[in-house]
Amino acid sequence: MKIFVAGLPLDMDDAELEEFFEKFGKVESVKVAIDRQTGKSRGFAFVEMPYAVEAREAIATLNNLGIGKKVLVVKEATESTLQRPPSAQSRGAGPSNRGFRPGSGRPPGRY
């Protein structure tokens, strides 16, 4: 079973996360998502456990567990969690509206 884990401390690596899940049974793989530009954790990961009973026990126990100032969100991975989030370029990052104050009635650059 593939498990989605969010709310990870940014310094947690694959090995540390694997230790959390090994307490519940066999772990096939652990992959903490890493930002390509910064090389730092993105705060979420995927864990694969071959036995659904063990995976469900891990989910039930670890979900909402506080780690430092963070609270883990642990659930079965779904299609939406498996899809790669869009990059900044594909989000339509365009020109800045710096200086524009909503409700001022003045469009940016016309002062």
Image: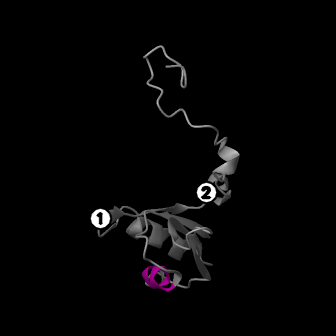
- Number of callouts: 2
Precedes in sequence: disc 1 or disc 2:
1
- Name the element at disc 2: helix
Q: Quadrant of residue 84?
A: bottom right
Q: Which mark is residue 81?
A: 2
Magenta-drawn stretch contains 19: yes
Q: Residue furthest top?
A: 105
- Name the element at disc 1: loop
Magenta-drawn stretch contains 94: no
Horizontal and vertical percent position of residue 25: 51, 84
**Residue count near mark 2 (Cα–Cα under 10 Å), binned few <14, some 14–19, many ≥20:** some
> What residue appears at the point 62 percent right and 70 percent down from the top-left corner?
1
> What residue appears at the point 51 percent right and 70 percent down from the top-left corner?
41
Foreground: disc 1 or disc 2? 1
Find out whether the residues at labels 1 and 2 contact each other: C-beta distance under 8 Å: no
Horizontal and vertical percent position of residue 33: 57, 69
Q: Nearer the viewer, residue 97 or 70?
A: 97
Magenta highlight: main SS: helix
> What residue appears at the point 51 percent right and 72 percent down from the top-left corner?
40
Give the residue type that dot 1 points to.
Answer: Lys
Q: Quadrant of residue 38?
A: bottom right
Q: Which mark is residue 8?
A: none
- Location of mark 1 (residue): 69
Q: Is residue 8 left or right of residue 29?
A: left
Give the residue type that dot 2 points to.
Answer: Thr
> What residue appears at the point 34 percent right and 63 percent down from the top-left corner?
70
Q: Is residue 87 left or right of residue 45?
A: right
Q: Which residues are magenta?
A: 15-20
Gap in angstroms between the C-alphas marked 1 and 2: 23 Å
Horizontal and vertical percent position of residue 39: 56, 74
Residue 101 in the image: above or below residue 58: above
